Amino acid sequence: MNDHKGLWVFAEQKQGKIKSVTLELLGKGRELADILGVELTAILLGHNIQGLCQELISYGADRVLVADHKSLENYQTDTYTRIISQQVKERKPEIILVGASHIGRDLAPRVARRLDTGLTADCTELGIDEAERLLLQTRPAFGGNIIATIVTPEGRPQMATVRPKIMVSLPKDSTRKGEIVPVPVTEFAEDLRVKILSIVKGDKHGCNLEDAEIIVSGGRGLGKPENFKIIEALAKALGGEVGASRDAVDAGWISHDHQVGQTGKAVRPSLYIACGISGAVQHLAGMKDSETIVAINSNPKAPIFDVADFGIVGDLKVVVPALTQMILEQKENN
Amino acid sequence: MHNIVCIKQVPDTREVRLDPKTGNLIREGVPSIINPEDKNAIEEALRLKDEFGGTVTVITMGPPQAEEALREALAMGADKAVLIGDRAFAGADTGATSYTLGCAINKLGKYDLILCGREAIDGNTAQVGPQLGEILGLPQITYVRKVVIRKNIIEAERALEDGYEVVSTQLPVLLTVVKECNEPRIAAVADIIEAYREKEVIAWSAKDVDGDKARIGLNGSWTRIRKAAAVKPQKGKVQILEGSVGDVTKTLVAEFNKRNLL
Amino acid sequence: MNFEFTKEQLLIKKMVKAFADSKVAPLADGIDEQCNIPRELLAELKKLKIFGIPYDKKYGGAGGSYFEMVLMIEELSKVSAGLGFFMAVHYLGATAINLFGTEEQKKKFLPRLCSGEAIGSFGFTEADTGSDPKAVTCNAKLVDDGYILNGQKRFTTNGSEPGVLVTFAKTETGVSAFAFDKFQEGYSVSKPWEKMGNRGAETVDVYFNDVKLPSDSLLGQEGKGFGILLRGIAIGKLNMSAISLGLGEASLEEAIKYAKQRIVRGKPIATLPTTQALIANALVLNESSRWMLYRATEMASKGLGDIDYESAVTKLYIAKAIKDSIDYSLQVHGCYGYVRDFKVERMYRDIRLMEVIEGASEVQRVIVASNALK
């Protein structure tokens, strides 16, 4: 056990672009590695991705293990699992962090089982028990009603997937120096059991509230169905989905698949903006676990303000378009 | 075609309430249900049975009352149900659970598909499916939202954050399905009566499953819960933004930036 | 005594509720407005296999009991009493055949009734008779190979649905019961009555104009129709009470939801003692109705006690109790309870039927009192 040293981050990239969750993990990983007094390594797989190594270093990695090969161009469970597991067996890190993305959640369990070690899913908080050199993996469970801290006392490496948009990345420092270590790649025919036939971008099946990171919801306070356009505009500006209260759905203003709450969908996005929603218990039950909640309502006594982080008492028909405008301006300037 | 569906009975976390005084979870009276995406997995197996014939076996690892989940699956149309239950399994983490399921599946004989829901609503780990795939040495397709089978080739749509990919492999394969995959059928009343009065739920103990004792239950689990607490609602933490519309939107956008939301 | 549902019953309740919430609720207002069960919904109902719950599997039934049938009707009626009524009347016809039919008659009619391909109905009332058997004017004349039926029946629910009718007509020896397929030559129906509530199931008058009935249409013995009527509607009264109970529960749920959401002077009206009193009143009536119905149904399922009496006392109580219960729930809504936007308005109309159908409450009182005084 003691021969395992170092903290690794799985560097997820897609079409030559590092996923933001990877940068967030490097930020957190840097902090944890410093506590442990070990190196922070990013393991990067892909094709024609040499250019990304320095970026990973700029965001905090001491070392990048890079496997660059045609067969790694798109994520593929078998190949990625084999290469990462081999590297872990060879180099013996004590901790591996993986983003809880669709890819990370496909990969990490497979790797953990192959290495026969523990894995904690969807962590929202990470820390170190310095006395025992253990990774403290904190995550919500039971529909967000319980928060549990989990450790892997004996299995090595200790593995965790981490929810996106929770950890904060470090500011980019292009002057940082690090080591880049190429990983040899051999192809195995048996790795290619699952073939990717095509990748389709941007097509989503209806509205995908559960997975949305940002949700803008409208309720009875919109007054009429046409006002959902205001909500849609803000959701679009934020890259989020449109939600609704039961009242708005029952009134026939929007379809049921948008409904958030007890009889609708339970969501926990990073940002939830409730517009003209009073906050009946049934609605709160479906969204109160969102990371940041903004309530916009004309009634200062509306119960939605009890669960909100930020409240604006005012006319949503004025406030929401102003907010949309400001976000669009900021996006243009960037 | 023989398809095996792994299901879990879960408390309906959407019905969980907090004690307003203590802030603790009220677990009593929370109904137990088949985990929603596991129901999609059952439906997909039944849909394929409707199309190609064959049999559907449903298995679960859990306490005796998990039999109710299996009875519902039988009522939906599954042919065979196995309840893997033993005190020796208590405290299993996802790794030990997938090991146990793997042992049980190996005893069930030949199969074409293993179907799981993507994740359970009580744990939200999404780990058992892929770990089971690893144990059985199967290729896996996770986040499946559509399945087409021709002879022994499966073509599936795998949901991505920003779209989907179409992938293909030979059977047997392990799938984890998402709720967009289908709309699970509602068990018919006459079939419920039949499932309770005429169908059998096979009970397997640790001995029947015939696994390595060191790899099941708490002993076989690498992870340990160090601390768990109910999340208490934080009332009155709201910060009411005041001033002109310009002021409040500006403050809000600044907060969004601080929290990395844009 | 055991006051718990079996696991099987719990799952049935849960599945019928899931069905009602997902497939019926979106159509409930339309069912009421158009007084019609959409054909797509009927197809879904067949898939739910609810048309032959208490009958033997050899006739295509589910092999369950009256209890599961009652639970199903209660759950459907929470969302649409019109649909609950449709099912209840189907069972009125089917149960008469199941109880009094010969082996051949059961084999002839029940499989189609159990699958939902044939919808059951039950015609006793006539324009001038109410439910008095002596005044029946429909006439079945014995001929060589059967009977020739003439006359008309009033308020025959599901009379316009293809399927099987159980009806009553005078024969030489008295009133006899007959079961036969609707819409054969000489069978026709009026346009539907415009009802106040329980809209969805169509209620029509049916006309028999020289309808030729084969001899195996006779249900039970000739002249013994009245006994079939009494026993048939005894089970029917359980289903009517199940509709009532469903309405009572659903209306209270609406009232509670409303009371929590409706803010007056900065506070939800649920915090007001006056609102709480209304809710408590409704709850007591619902609870007492529930246990009375479940007890009577359990007895009927097990063949215990005098079911004619038990179902009469049950319906007599529940029809009034739930009418009052819904009245309280409507009162919680204030004027909103009086408008169509709120579900309680429909429920208030639906419940009113229960004090006049299958023997008005006055008739039930006679049954109940005679039993006490004998």
Image: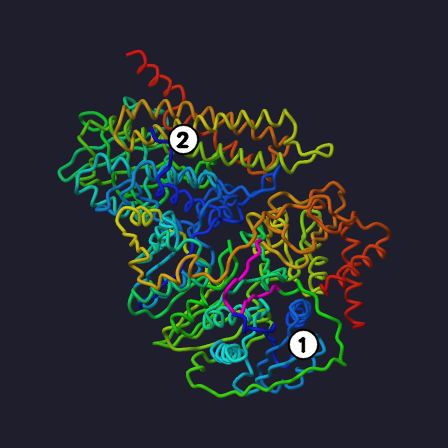
Residue at the extreme left of the image, as rendered: C144
Q: Do the residues marked 2 and 1 share a common chain?
A: no
Q: Which chain is mark 2 on? A: C
Q: Residue B106: x and y, percent?
A: 32, 67
- Taking the spot 48% from the left edge, 64% from the top edge, the residue there is B127
Number of numbered tags placed on the structure image: 2
Which residue in the protein does label 1 denote? A61
Q: Is C85 on the left-hand or right-hand side of A49?
A: left
- Taking the spot 77% from the left edge, 53% from the top edge, the residue there is A317
Q: Nearer the viewer, residue C202 or A166?
A: A166
Q: Is C373 rendered above or below residue B84?
A: above
Q: Nearer the viewer, residue C311 or C179?
A: C311
- Taking the spot 45% from the left edge, 61% from the top edge, the residue there is B221
Q: Amino acid at mark 1?
A: Ala
Which image quadrant for residue B102? bottom left
Q: Is B50 rendered above or below residue C38?
A: below
Q: Which of the two discs, 2 and 1, sits closer to the camera?
A: 1
Q: Nearer the viewer, residue C296 or A156?
A: A156
Q: Is C278 on the left-hand or right-hand side of B135?
A: right
CA–CA distance in space, label 2 to label 1 = 72 Å
